[in-house]
Amino acid sequence: MPTNLLDLVEAHKYQELFLKHLRWSKPDLKPLSIDVDGQTYIATNVSSYKGLRVWACPELPNSATQTVIDRAVTKQSVDRIVIFHDDAKQVWRWPSRTSKGGATTTRLTSHTHLAGRENPKLIDRLQLITLEPGESLGATEIIERVKHAFDVETERETKRASKLMAAMYDALEKAGTPEHDISVTLARILFLMFGDDTEMWNTDLFQDFILEQTSPDGSNLSERLNDLFRFLNTKPNRDNGLQHFRGFRYVNGGIFEERLELPSLAGTNLRRAILDACTAKWGQISPAIFGSMFQAVRDAKTRREFGEHYTSEKDILKTLEPLFLDELRDEFQRSIGHREERSRLSKLRERLGKIRFLDPACGCGNFIIIAYREMRILEISILERLRIKDAERVSHLAANQLEFGLDGELDAEGLSRTTLLDPLVRLENYFGIELDEWPAKIAETAMFLTDRQCDLQMLERLGYAPERLPISSQSTIHTNTCDGSQNGNALLLDWREVFPIGPENIIAGNPPFIGHKERTKQQGLELRAVWGGRGIGHLDYVTGWYKKAIDYFGDAPGRWAFVSTNSVTQGESASLLFPPVFDAGWRIKFGHRTFAWQSEAPNAAVVHCIIIGFDRDSTTPQRLFAYDNPKAEPRELPARSITPYLTVGKPLVVKGRRRMLSPFLDPIKAGSTPIDWENLVVTEDDFDVVSADPVAVKYLRHYFGGDELINRIPRWCLWLVGANQSDLDGSDILRQRIAAVRERRLASNRSETKKLAGKPHLFGEIRQPDWDYLGIPQSFAESRLYATAARLPKEVIASIKLFTMADPDGFHFGIVSSSMFITWQKTVGGRIKSDPSVSSSLVWNTLPLLPVSLGQRRAIIDAGSAVIAARALMPGRTLAQHYDPSRMSSDLLEAHRLLDAEVDRAFGAGKTCQSEIERQQVLFEAYEQLISGERTSSE
């Protein structure tokens, strides 16, 4: 970062700063002239990038005037940084996206710089929004960077609010309040504090109520809260004698409908906790973060039971924008300036009102909150634009009357017809299903609060907003309740009963992250039932939501998307999940490849996720987003079509097979299995005793699985194939160990194992090569750039954890050691935890090696030999050390680079591939070619 950045800031050379040093783009809008109270201010667009613009105003008016100027800028540039300055001071303003429901709110965060002072914070923020040479970001990405750099006040307020909510939860729990009552009470308190901050009634009315109407020791707190809750659910003509409720309004809508009787709260510190919480700026906090607040106050055991993972707003938008929001926003932009602008915008608004949205695993409602908020913001923008068109029309009519002397009243009602309409985007079109009642209650409340924030923005931008109290419209959250109903188990519900089918229905969400090993017996039964009783193999629990979505839509149009663990696009899971999806007529509309899931919650677990969205509209482009590493920002790839593995290519599903797909590859087989209860296997602790026996030592062999090969771990076995009976009888060690094997095999419940008791000195399954062989580990670390294979002498016994093949000339070593092989493995193969796991049927037998000429074969053999030679230059290293990405020698890296060049050509690449994505595309094209060839030959 150049050292003169602060000099440029102080010299007000903002255009030079952003264009030359931050590498943003040139300005694209003309300066704005803004009149405020008789004084004219000029705002100049000094730079832009993907719709986000920087404006400079060479004045430093008071904050109220800054807000008016910012509002005028908003009409030209929703996403913006506005810099106000004079010679002594400058204020950088950025609209907090979580304030009043969206990016266009005028509740601004700010950073102040005083001339002549060091300002490392400002420099740090500029560094965050600096583009690297050649770097290209999407609109969402650059907005997120600026938000991360400048939107710090809201983040700080959100963290504080989470702690305050946890304190209230603790106090209610300490008083012995049932969990159901805690969830309802906290939802109501949130509502009341939000009302204090958003002009539902007089500011701080609820805070004053707690201060003035409850005793300092909290002795009457529960009584006062119980009475207030009942009052808020009582229709007008209430007892006016209750002066301490004056100013509160009838709410209705279910929030205060249930009658609670809170226990005594004296001595619980709840009063103090409520008063502390009332000082937070609840109007500035997006209700979308209520989920993370909830996670902060629930224990870890509960989180594991329900598989809760609260998705960040950023990741929610990764789902909703390519699924439907981008399409609607693009239509809005295309309509502006069109000769039929008013008609097109009116039709778009009508469409917004017809869209209905379901999150079938809604938690605290993050997805429906963000979806609703973004739709309301778009409708407000449409209404704002329609008002401008009506004003232009009225102005035109007035001009004509003046010019031609026409009599009669002006048709000024066009303005009121547009602006005084209730929103078509309504809460009742947004649905959720949630297993746990507590987050469901938060979701219901948060949706109303989001509605209120959007109304405030509507009031600010259009001058009016609908009256919401008493509540007559709200979202519908289906959940389990304290009476034992199961309305919140999405896998047991008929979604059409809770979310009637319609032409503009959308389903999206973040179902539980529960792998096949973690799911309970009951969850397994639910998953099997959803899939029609068929075998579910290693399917993740989330795939139940995929099948429910398929069943819900049937033949109807629609679109749907889920955040999922990346296991659904790997190995057996992909081969089980996607054929039913494609058979039902769905295509992958968009996909986000593996990225690190982000949660707003503190101490959130790190989970690697993907996002997949589906539709049936072949006329719209498909979109694929990739990440250079799981924590990087997404970049969009050109994609004509997308595979189930989230690669560019046709939607082919790779299924395991018994025979080799490529005739140019030999089969592999797993090593031997002892079935010995550690009696034929010799550990390092037992080695000295066994090797001291003159008979047993003759049959002692090195015994390698993947770990032993990769890490050079000492391990042996007693390999008694061909041993004579006198040796078996003449050694106490052999006799004792063989007897133990016989006894354990006879005690087995498996008939096959009992039969093996007849030859207790032999491994139960023998697949040892009679020749020197290539050993391929069954699994290896995710971080490996290459598979860690090696040649072994026939005297080394291969375990079940090691695949073997003859490979006398080293050709297969070259293939296995290439980037092509590990790319195929990581793309279509399964995993053990996160480590790639080789499968003979799914990975090796499907490897799509095209016909190889003798010259190509020779080149691959020679390049593989060079890899072995490079390893030999550092003989003291294990394979793990050789292939530690941070320690690979330059000689070994160069040898692999040359090997990759030869292998890439053998798979059909015209040149050496430069990335995993390129190799995936080559591999799937080769796979399709070989599969098509098989079909043709069989017809």
Image: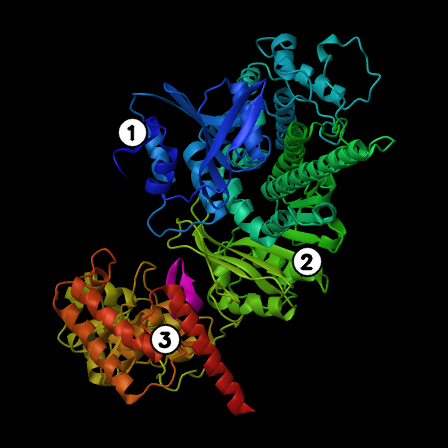
The x, y position of residue 769, in whole percent, is: 28, 83
Q: Earlier in the sequence, mark 3 or mark 2?
A: 2
Q: Is residue 816 left or right of residue 796?
A: right
Q: Is residue 333 left or right of residue 555?
A: left
Q: Residue 7: which disc?
A: 1
Looking at the rendering, in which quadrant would you find the C terminus? bottom right
Q: Earlier in the sequence, mark 3 or mark 1?
A: 1
Q: Residue 558: which disc?
A: 2
Q: Residue at x 51, y 19 (%)?
A: 63
Q: Earlier in the sequence, mark 1 or mark 2?
A: 1
Looking at the rendering, in which quadrant would you find the N terminus? top left
Determine crowd level at label 1: few under 14, some 14-19, many 20+ residues with C-alpha closer than 10 A. Answer: few
In this view, the residue in front, 610 or 114, is 114
The answer to whether 635 is drawn above or below residue 713 in the figure is above
Q: Is residue 51 magenta?
A: no
Q: Is residue 742 left or right of residue 934?
A: left
The x, y position of residue 103, in whole percent, is: 55, 36
Mark 3 or 2: in front is 3
**Kind of residue sitting beneath label 1:** Asp
Q: Secondary structure at mark 1?
A: helix
**Kind of residue sitting beneath label 3:** Ala
**Kind of residue sitting beneath label 2:** Gly
Q: Quadrant of residue 695?
A: bottom left
Q: Residue at x 12, y 75 (%)?
A: 694
Determine crowd level at label 2: few under 14, some 14-19, many 20+ residues with C-alpha closer than 10 A. Answer: many
The x, y position of residue 205, in whole percent, is: 65, 15
* Magenta residue span: 824-837
Q: Residue furthest front?
A: 404
- Residue placed under numbered mark 3 in the picture: 909
